[in-house]
Image (cartoon, helix red, strand yellow):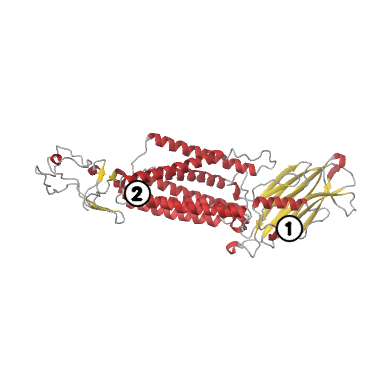
């Protein structure tokens, strides 16, 4: 989450200081150890290279700052002339082609440290399209405070990294042509610094999130609408798990729409990503946390057999799944809020601790292990009992999960190799490094919804058990072990159940059983004695089944 925005502010006499924003309001005071500053949104597009031809604006960097300088009293001299010197420039691609965003921040720090704007000394090979702007600071009412207003507009002519460096300078006299850096003074900035691309304020490396989230929202919305139509058309065959699937699908659609709207609003209005969070970002974050939690919980209970192998979970299982889901949700919220607040900590008062990430990793790993073990156990049980139809459904789910896990693993390997410098990852596609799990979630959720869709036998599957094949007689007969009264579930009339040619089941209505109805027969018994079988006469000969008898046909 915290990696989805990119404006970076670095106090160059200390460690680099990163903040998030696109139209950044600045109201900060820096102590006497800082006299040089750099601002960057990293990658920007020029007008001709605008993605999808979205040339709504002329790309530029606009600095509009009120500057206050208070030199140390010991260094104050009445003849000194103070000024602010700002420079905006482009960094050629050859110097940063193999660097990730964090390494680029370090590179900009080193580049600015080696640049002396007061003496106009800089590396012409590493800096191109340089524009410098100088503003004299005035001392009003003979106070020790110097101030002025700096306004500069820099047009972006080259696609790539753009940076702004500000340095406080002084001259020993107003007539002197030699400027030197102010080494000991308190500096305050109030105003705004904006980085505007041809399409808006969103950083170039994160523009891809807009079309990605739009496509994800459309896919989920269309699929969710289709799923609701199926539920309505087959309402008599709907079971509880179908409502859970529908809720998760629409949660994912709303989450994707929330992120799309958040990025669009930040792009058009230039609102900083943090902190505080814009309302649209807060809403999107909440829905993302819920979607991630519910998706894991849904996949877990499906792999535990809910909805197909058994009608309900035990109270112990419900409590365990609920506790794990709630723990994962709380831990995810805490770590995301901490990460974003940390990356916006200008003072770097604390260092990053892996202990914040550890609970989420533990709960995520618990989900994955539990899902895997449940899936293996349920498939083993179905295979051992010869329930081939249900086994086919779980096999398709396992194959879908396996294919996309391999896809995510390969993409992760590619990302790691790119970060290690094995090859250059195009900065225009940096956003793809964070969406692999979103693609996996989409694929698995669609697969679950499709495989567990309402069908003419969904209620029967949840309440019945297919018995093993009769290998001794070499017949493809199957029986259905019903643990409830078929008549109470409205199962009447003839219907058939097919599983890709594996077996066919034809069942007749249950009303009109032979006999006076005073006796109850247990059809679940695999081989009752001949004398107890109402379908056999005393000599052991089978009678013809009467109207309404429960029988299976090969």
Work out whether residue 112 or residue 543 is closer to the camera in this orientation and state it: 543
- In the drawing, does residue 205 fall left or right of residue 317? right
In the rendering, at what x and y percent does residue 388 appear?
Answer: 32, 50
Q: Quadrant of residue 304?
A: top left
Residue 318 at least partly seen = yes
Q: Badge 2 is on which residue?
A: 391
Quadrant hosting residue 243: top left
Rendered image: mark on residue 320: none
> Tag 2's secondary structure?
helix
The residue that appears at 17% across and 47% down in the rendered structure is 549
Q: Residue at x 57, y 56 (%)?
A: 208
Res 421 → quadrant: bottom right
Q: Residue 528: give x, y in percent of width and height.
A: 18, 40
Looking at the image, the residue that sits furthest to the left is 539
Which residue is label 1 attached to? 89
- Specify whether residue 453 is in view: no
Q: Nearer the viewer, residue 193 or 244?
A: 244
- Of residues 369 and 205, the one drawn nearer to the viewer in this rendering: 369
Residue 430 drawn at (x, y percent): 59, 55
């Amino acid at each position: 989450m915290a990696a989805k925005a990119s404006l970076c502010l670095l106090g160059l006499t200390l460690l680099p200081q990163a903040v998030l924003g696109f139209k950044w309001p600045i109201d900060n005071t820096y102590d006497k150890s800082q006299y040089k500053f750099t601002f960057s949104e990293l990658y920007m597009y020029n007008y001709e290279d605008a993605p999808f031809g979205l040339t709504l604006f002329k790309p530029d960097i606009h600095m509009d700052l009120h500057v206050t300088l208070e030199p140390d009293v010991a260094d104050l001299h009445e003849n000194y002339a103070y000024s602010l010197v700002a420079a905006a420039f482009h960094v050629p691609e050859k110097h940063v082609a193999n660097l990730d965003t964090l390494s680029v921040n370090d590179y900009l720090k080193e580049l600015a440290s080696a640049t002396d704007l007061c003496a106009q000394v800089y590396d012409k090979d590493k800096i191109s399209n340089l524009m410098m702007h100088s503003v004299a600071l005035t001392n009003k009412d003979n106070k020790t405070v110097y101030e002025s207003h700096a306004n500069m507009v820099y047009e972006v002519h080259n696609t790539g990294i753009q940076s702004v460096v500000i340095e406080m300078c002084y001259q020993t006299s107003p007539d002197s042509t030699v400027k030197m850096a102010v080494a000991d003074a308190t500096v305050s900035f109030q105003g705004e610094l904006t980085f505007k691309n041809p399409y808006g304020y969103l950083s170039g490396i994160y523009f891809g999130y807009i079309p990605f989230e739009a496509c994800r929202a459309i896919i989920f919305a269309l699929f969710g609408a289709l799923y609701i139509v199926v539920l309505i058309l087959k309402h008599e065959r709907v079971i509880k798990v179908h409502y859970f699937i529908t809720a998760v699908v629409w949660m994912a659609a709303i989450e994707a729409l929330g992120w799309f709207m958040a990025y669009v609003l930040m792009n058009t209005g230039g609102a900083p990503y943090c902190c505080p969070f814009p309302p649209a970002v807060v809403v999107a974050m909440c829905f993302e946390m819920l979607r991630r939690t519910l998706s894991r919980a849904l996949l877990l209970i499906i792999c535990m057999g809910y909805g197909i192998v058994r009608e309900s979970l035990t109270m112990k299982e419900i409590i365990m799944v609920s506790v794990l889901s709630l723990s994962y949700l709380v831990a995810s919220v805490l770590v995301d809020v901490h990460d974003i607040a940390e990356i916006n900590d200008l003072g770097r008062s604390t260092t990053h601790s892996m202990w914040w990430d550890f609970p989420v990793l533990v709960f995520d790993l618990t989900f994955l292990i539990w899902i895997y073990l449940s899936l293996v156990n349920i498939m083993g049980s179905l295979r051992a009992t010869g329930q081939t139809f249900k086994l086919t459904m779980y096999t398709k789910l396992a194959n879908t999960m396996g294919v996309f896990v391999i896809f995510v693993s390969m993409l992760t390997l590619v990302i790691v190799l790119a970060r290690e410098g094995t090859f250059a990852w195009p900065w225009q596609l940096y956003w793809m490094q964070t969406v692999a799990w979103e693609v996996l979630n989409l694929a698995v959720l669609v697969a679950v919804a499709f495989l567990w869709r309402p069908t003419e036998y969904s209620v029967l599957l949840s309440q019945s058990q297919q018995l093993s094949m009769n290998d001794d007689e070499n017949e493809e007969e199957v029986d259905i072990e019903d643990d409830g009264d078929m008549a109470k579930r409205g199962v009447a009339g003839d219907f058939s159940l097919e599983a890709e040619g594996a077996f066919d089941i034809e069942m007749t209505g249950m009303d009109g059983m032979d006999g006076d109805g005073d006796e109850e027969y247990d059809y679940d018994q695999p081989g009752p004695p001949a004398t107890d079988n109402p379908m056999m006469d005393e000599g052991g000969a089978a009678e013809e089944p009467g109207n309404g008898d429960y029988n299976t046909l090969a």
